[in-house]
C-alpha cells in the first residue's frame, strides 16, 4: 500500500512537470521548478512553526507564486501553470483546492496592481484579515 502512495506521488509530480513543459518548454519548466523551490523555502523560513504549514506557508506560496508567474509569463500562462499544479495533485481535497485557487487569484490581483509580490502577499498573510484564505478546512 505505501509503495503505491509513493508511486502515485511520483506520477503526480511527473504529470505536473510534463504539463509545465507543455506551457514553457523544458528549460522554462526547469527554471519554474527552481523558482517554486525558492518560494517554498522563503515561505517556510518566514513561518517555521510546523502548525503554519497548511495555513500561512501554503497561502504565501500560492499568492506569491501566482503573482510572480503572472508578472513573468502573463495571465494566460500563469493560469495554465497554476492549473498544472492544482489538477495533478491526486491527494488534494476540494476545500484545499478552492483555498489554493482563491489565494492564486489574490496573487494575480497583486500583479495587476503592480505590487511587489512578496511584500504584498506576506503583508496579507500577516494581517490575517481575510484577504487570503489561511484555512483550507473551514
Image (cartoon, rainbow, N blue to C red):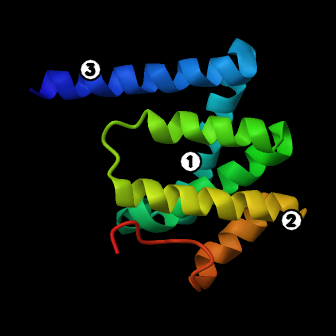
Kindly identify the residue that appears in the image at 47 percent across and 21 percent down: 15
Whole-angstrom CA distance, mark 3 to mark 2, is 40 Å
Residue 127 left/right relative to 138: right
Mark in front: 3 vs 1: 3
Q: Nearer the viewer, residue 44 or 133?
A: 133
Element assignment for label 2: loop
Is any part of residue 60 visible from this angle? Answer: no
Whole-angstrom CA distance, mark 3 to mark 1, is 23 Å
Q: Nearer the viewer, residue 64 or 113?
A: 113
Q: Is residue 69 above or below residue 138?
A: above
For residue 26, which quarter of the picture? top right
Sequence-wise, the earlier of marks 3 and 2 is 3
Element assignment for label 3: helix
Where residue 133 sits: x, y (%)?
52, 71
| Residue at which label 3 appears | 7
Query: What label sits on residue 115 in the rendered view?
Result: 2
Q: Residue furthest right?
A: 114
Where residue 78 sits: x, y (%)?
72, 41
Q: Residue furthest left?
A: 1
Query: What label sits on residue 89 in the rendered view?
Result: none
Where residue 106 sits: x, y (%)?
68, 65
Kindly identify the residue that appears in the image at 59 percent across and 86 percent down: 129
Amino acid at each position: 500500500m505505501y509503495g503505491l502512495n509513493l508511486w502515485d506521488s511520483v506520477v503526480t509530480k511527473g504529470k505536473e512537470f510534463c504539463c509545465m513543459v507543455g506551457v514553457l518548454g523544458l528549460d522554462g519548466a526547469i527554471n519554474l521548478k527552481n523558482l517554486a523551490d525558492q518560494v517554498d523555502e522563503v515561505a517556510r523560513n518566514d513561518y517555521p512553526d510546523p502548525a503554519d504549514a497548511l495555513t500561512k506557508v501554503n497561502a504565501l506560496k500560492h499568492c506569491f507564486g501566482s503573482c510572480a508567474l503572472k508578472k513573468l509569463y502573463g495571465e494566460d500562462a500563469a493560469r495554465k501553470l497554476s492549473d498544472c499544479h492544482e489538477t495533478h495533485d491526486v491527494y488534494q481535497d476540494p476545500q484545499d483546492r478552492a483555498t489554493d485557487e482563491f489565494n492564486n487569484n489574490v496573487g494575480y490581483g497583486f500583479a495587476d496592481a503592480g505590487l511587489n509580490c512578496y511584500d504584498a502577499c506576506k503583508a496579507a498573510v500577516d494581517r490575517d484579515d481575510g484577504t487570503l484564505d489561511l484555512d483550507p478546512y473551514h
